[in-house]
Amino acid sequence: MADDKKLTTRADDFSAWYNELVLRAELADYSPVKGSMVIRPNGYGIWERMQRALDDKFKETGHRNAYFPLFIPESFLKKEAQHVEGFAPECAVVTHGGGKKLEEPLVVRPTSETIIYHMFAKWVQSYRDLPLLINQWANVVRWEMRTRLFLRTLEFLWQEGHTAHATHDEAEEETRRMLGVYRDFMENWMAMPVITGQKTESEKFAGALRTYSCEAMMQDNKALQAGTSHNLGQNFAKAFELKFQAESGEIEHAWNTSWGVSTRMVGGLVMTHGDDNGLVTPPRLAPIEVVIVPIWKSDEERGRLTEAAMALKAELTDYNGRGAHDRLRVHVDAREGLKPGAKYYEWELQGVPLRLELGPKDLEKGSVFSARRDTRAKAAIPREGVAASVVALLETIQNDLFAAAKARREANTHRNVTSYDEFKKIIEGPGGFVYAGWNGDPAVEARVKEETKATIRVIPDAEFRSAEAPTTCIVTGEPAKYEVVWAKAY
RNA sequence: CGGGGCGUAGCUUAGCCCGGUAGAGCGCCUGCUUCGGGAGCAGGAGGUCGGAGGUUCGAAUCCUCUCGCCCCGACCA
């Protein structure tokens, strides 16, 4: 090995780069059970930031948290025909408990629609009980064939929102609202631009009427489905007899929605912003936003500079320019026996957005020396008013990360592609998103997947569509029913 | 489950063809000197070579079986 301190580069082997980064930045580690992983503090810290931001948004939109059990009677899964077909193959099933064979096997939840709507049926009698707006933070298990850290593991953490409404339109509005919440989070917290839109019939959630999705582009130009929101119609309400008496006096089935995002987003964050030096975390999701590295030569200096670093930290954390509940998250790295350079590399690997160096020269000059993680730009900042400068710089980093990611996506987005040959050249070559016409036939979708591995990621929402809609289907040349986004996906 | 690769110290690995004292780098521990981009020197700890069987005077190395992991496919948040 030439230099085992350096990561494999993205250009050399994107997949190896990703795995090495996740392991070496200590985001996660392989567990003894094949396909499952341990989320280490660095990774879990990011997830906690994600949870906090999302949970606030869920509460703001009227949802309340609850918790439903891990085990679901096997018969529940079978009550909704499409649902069981979609999920049965990947379910873990408990057949024994307490040393005895169970009368009915229990499925370890792959998702909780069935148990939740079973319970909703007990709780809802009247239209006055609606809407019922519930979210749960939980782990789920899906027995996947091929796993990858954060992107696909046997067990993962997520949130699943489940709601019941009196009308289709209310449910549709909710489905759309939560897709918007996801988009807001992904763009403004993760700094990860997404395309929103509707999934095709073959890609929609098993049991849903319609599925909407947020699709992001990773640095290898592959798509990542980052979050989905489903309008379940009355499918589950009918299967679980979730009924209510309407104002009119009629008994009606409720209309459900479900929506979820998972720890997969941590993988998305890595693949959106990471570079060959390691992780790059958007400030808003960084467990540590600022690391202060004091620099000294002598023992006398060490005491002085460590003290100055602690004072700097105190000034930063006391600053309430972002509000009392959003204090700067600052760490001082005063470890002895490590040279400053070694510390720089370590914090860069871990993706801390901003580093402040504080040495004797800075003390003399009344400044601190800053280094941005994203651009690696360095500059002296006046010590006076440093907190406001740091807050502003972090905001700039947050915005620049989003702008860079968006520019990269646009640079790898291909529109006005009308020939299937050209389409294949792009997909098999550089990859990226290809906007093209589709006749709406699932057989065409299947054929393209078979031939190129590309799938329709979404039928994009209006704002993402091309100025001039494609008129013909990319494959058959027939009139196009939709403009769709094609890409290879994770 | 198909195809490919690999299991040697905490990590990365050399050695394996051609059997003969298990080696290195990183990391770790102790001490001294260092400290503005991965420090140096000295000393030290750490291995039943994935497991089981076989061949042999002798196996990390050869044979058989087995277990596990990674990558590529089919399936998917």
Image (cartoon, helix red, strand yellow):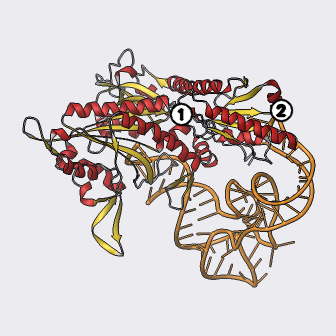
Quadrant of the rendered structure where residue A133 is?
top left
Chain assignment, label 1: A
Q: Residues within 10 Å of mark 2 (few under 14, many from 20)?
A: some
Q: Secondary structure at mark 2?
A: helix
Q: Have a look at marks 2 and 1 and say if they share a chain.
A: yes
First in residue order: circle 2 vs circle 1: 1
Q: Which residue is drawn at the image coordinates 35% and 51% (left, top)?
A: A67
Quadrant of the rendered structure where residue A318 is?
top right
Vertical relation: A86 (above or below) A169: below
Q: Is residue A396 left or right of residue A439?
A: right
> What's the residue type where badge 1 is placed?
Asp
Q: Which residue is at the far top? A: A468
Residue A380 position within the rendered picture, expressed as x and y whole percent measured from the top left = 74, 24
How many marks the image carries: the answer is 2
> A154 or A244: which is nearer to us?
A244
Q: Residues within 10 Å of mark 1 (few under 14, many from 20)?
A: few
Residue of label 2: A360
Residue A460 position within the rendered picture, expressed as x and y whole percent measured from the top left = 36, 26
Residue of label 1: A326
Residue A281 position within the rendered picture, expressed as x and y whole percent measured from the top left = 58, 36
Q: Is residue A171 left or right of residue A110?
A: left
Residue B3 position within the rendered picture, expressed as x and y whole percent measured from the top left = 52, 55
**Whole-Å distance between the Cαs marked 2 and 1?**
31 Å
> A17 or A235: which is nearer to us?
A235
> A133 or A215: which is nearer to us?
A133
